[in-house]
């Protein structure tokens, strides 16, 4: 006998209500992807170091011009809420205490990937583009490369390029933010 499984999709408000009621464990790392609740991979040592380094660098260089949010929820649309490693947000006096940041609040997203590069590039990056996030970096720690995505369209990013050790990347939302790739990846 074959029993067809029916998947239950959740909207962003439903997902957030589950979080608020304590339905999930405090240590669970989850994202909402296409209305499905997806467990995230554990964070490795090099991944954690890269995120910590980026937090320090971006926090110092962007100071009062932006809020640097680390591994916090970012509402993309009604069926997606990601937890990017870094989201650089428009400054707000309440630091987003009144509501979660959305794609419209976001100038730059950084996803650090040691085991999830394919997922980040094929699932997350297109959704960031469709939502209008100006720039996304995927730091591929296995290949020591930063994939840079700019000029979002509903179909994806119009501009993408690889930046390697020895290269300098100038961020489109912050033209005065020139970063050596070694600074991001570590020496």
Image: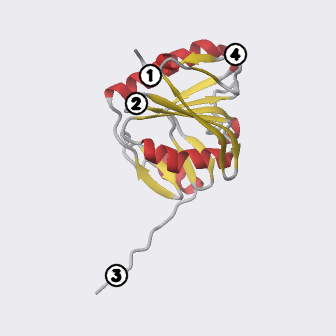
Q: How far apart in space, not on screen, are marks 3 and 2 (Cα)?
A: 42 Å
Residue linked to disc 3:
3
Residue pictured at 35% horizontal, 25% vertical: 46
Residue at the far bottom: name it: 1
In the visual, does 127 lie left or right of 25? right
In the rendered image, which quarter is residue 178 located in? Answer: top right
- Mark 1 touching mark 2, by CB under 8 A? yes
Query: In the rendered image, which residue does mark 1 sit on?
Result: 185
> Percent x, y for residue 77?
63, 51
Q: Nearer the viewer, mark 3 or mark 2?
A: 2
Q: Colour scheme used in the picture?
A: secondary structure
Q: Which residue is mark 4?
A: 176
Does 125 sit above or below residue 97? Answer: below
Residue, disc 2: 141
Circles 3 and 2, Cβ within 8 Å, touching? The answer is no
Most distant residue in the left direction: 1
Q: Up-down: is 44 above or below 131?
A: above
Whichever of labels 1 and 2 marks the residue nearer the N terminus, that label is: 2
């Amino acid at each position: 006998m074959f029993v067809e499984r029916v998947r239950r999709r959740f909207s962003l408000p439903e997902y957030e209500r589950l979080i608020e009621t304590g339905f999930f464990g405090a240590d669970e790392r989850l994202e909402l992807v296409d209305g499905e609740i997806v467990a995230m991979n554990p964070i490795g040592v090099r991944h954690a170091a890269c995120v910590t380094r980026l937090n320090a660098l971006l926090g110092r260089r962007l100071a009062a011009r932006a809020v640097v949010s680390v591994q916090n929820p970012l509402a993309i649309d009604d069926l997606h809420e990601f937890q990017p490693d870094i989201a650089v947000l428009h400054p707000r006096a309440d630091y987003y205490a009144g509501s979660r940041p959305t794609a419209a609040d976001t100038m730059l997203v950084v996803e650090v990937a040691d085991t999830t590069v394919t997922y980040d590039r094929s699932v997350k990056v297109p959704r960031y583009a469709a939502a209008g996030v100006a720039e996304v970096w995927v730091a591929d720690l296995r290949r020591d490369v930063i994939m840079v995505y700019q000029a979002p369209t509903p179909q994806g990013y119009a501009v993408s390029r690889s930046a390697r050790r020895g290269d300098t990347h100038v961020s489109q939302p912050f033209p005065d933010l020139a970063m050596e790739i070694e600074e991001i990846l570590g020496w």
